[in-house]
Image (cartoon, rainbow, N blue to C red):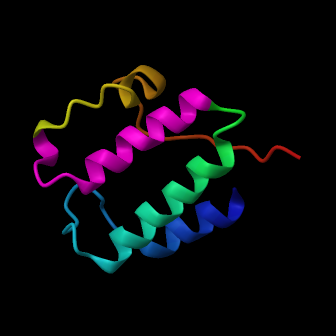
C-alpha cells in the first residue's frame, strides 16, 4: 500500500483536470486496477468504490459522473483519505 501512495504522490497530477491520454493518468489507472485485484477477495466494497473512480477517470464527461458506488463508501464531503498497511 505504501508503494501505491508513494507512486500516486510522485505523479503530481489532478485527476479531474488531467487529459484522458495523459501517461500519468494511465499509470494511476493501471495501479488502481492492480489494487482492485489485490483487494478483491477481502474488501469488495472498496473494490467497487475504486472501480467507480476508475470509470470516472476514464470518462470523457467527468463533470457529470454520478459516483454511484464511490460516494456511498467515501461520503460526499471527504477531502482526504487514510490508508493503513495490513500485515
Q: Nearer the viewer, residue 61 or 75?
A: 61
Q: How many marks?
A: 0
Q: In the rendered image, which quarter is residue 20 located in?
A: bottom left
Where is residue 68 drawn, in percent x and y? 31, 25
The residue at the point 59 percent across, 30 percent down is 44
Instruction: Report if residue 2 is visible in the image.
Output: yes
71 left or right of 82 in image: left
Q: Is residue 61 magenta?
A: yes
Q: What stretch is highlighted in magenta?
A: 44-63
Q: Identify the residue at image location x=61%, y=68%.
A: 6
Question: Where is the N terminus found, in terms of image quarters?
Answer: bottom right
When the figure is inspected, residue 16 is found, relative to residue 52, above or below; the finding is below
Residue 12: which quarter of the image?
A: bottom left
Q: Considering only vertical position in the picture, is 2 above or below 22?
A: above
73 over 22 or under it: above or below: above
54 on left or right of 19: right
In the image: residue 39, left or right of residue 58: right
- Residue 51's spot in the image, x, y percent? 42, 42
**Magenta span dominant secondary structure:** helix
- Which residue corresponds to the image point at 26% horizontal and 76% vertical from the top-left? 22
Amino acid at each position: 500500500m505504501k508503494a501505491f501512495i508513494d507512486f500516486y504522490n510522485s505523479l503530481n497530477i489532478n485527476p479531474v483536470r488531467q487529459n484522458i491520454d495523459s501517461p500519468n493518468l494511465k499509470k494511476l489507472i493501471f495501479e488502481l486496477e492492480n489494487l482492485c485485484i489485490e483487494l478483491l477477495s477481502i474488501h469488495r466494497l472498496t473494490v467497487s468504490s475504486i472501480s467507480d473512480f476508475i470509470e470516472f477517470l476514464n470518462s470523457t464527461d467527468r463533470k457529470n459522473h454520478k459516483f454511484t458506488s464511490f460516494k456511498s463508501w467515501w461520503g460526499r464531503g471527504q477531502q482526504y483519505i487514510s490508508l493503513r498497511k495490513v500485515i
